[in-house]
Amino acid sequence: MVAVAAPRPSVFLEGYWPQLKPAFLSIVLLRWDTNVRESTVLRLVGAGGIGLVPDAAINVFHWRAVAAVLVALFAVVLFAEVAVAAIRKRVL
């Protein structure tokens, strides 16, 4: 494409991007899935994240709230896992 004087954006979008897209999207999806999981754990060890809610409920002994939050977090992680698997299957 460079040899026929194609503009740089066209070289990237038509030449490089189709080859890079599967690997790029795979890495992005993996990092997103990992970040969803890690954000829960980080708060439980004191660094912030989604885990603030269960940590606060544990501190005041609201066990029903803790159970509800843990079920919701499990559902979010499960949904993220299924969504990432479906997107990867479609893209790759």
Image (tube, rainbow, N blue to C red):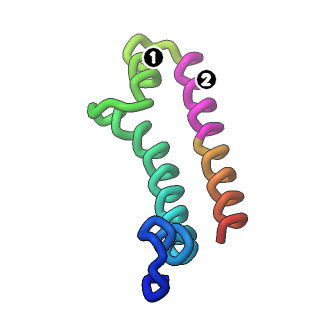
Cα distance between the residues tagged 2 and 1: 10 Å
Task: Give me the disc on residue 57.
Answer: 1
| Amino acid type for the residue under numbered disc 1 | Ala
| Amino acid type for the residue under numbered disc 2 | Ala
Q: Residue at x 52, y 67 (%)?
A: 13
Which secondary structure, mark 1? helix
Q: Residue at x 41, y 39 (%)?
A: 39
- Within 10 angstroms of label 2, few (less than 14), some, or many (20 or more) residues? few
Ranked by sequence position, the earlier of labels 2 and 1 is 1
The image quarter containing residue 7 is bottom left
78 shown above or below 49: below
Give the residues drawn in magenta, as a range.
64-76
Q: Residue at x 34, y 38 (%)?
A: 42
Task: Give me the disc on residue 68.
Answer: 2
Q: Left or right: where does residue 58 sit relative to residue 92?
A: left
Q: Main secondary structure of the magenta part?
A: helix
Determine whether label 2 and label 1 are within 8 Å by CB. Answer: no
- Of 90 and 45, the residue lying toward us: 90
Residue reaching furthest front?
Answer: 5
Q: Is residue 69 magenta?
A: yes
- Quadrant (top left, top right, bottom left, bottom right) of the C terminus: bottom right
Residue 88: give x, y in percent of width and height.
Answer: 64, 64
15 shown above or below 44: below
- Of 24 and 19, the residue lying toward us: 19
Residue 71: give x, y in percent of width and height.
Answer: 62, 31
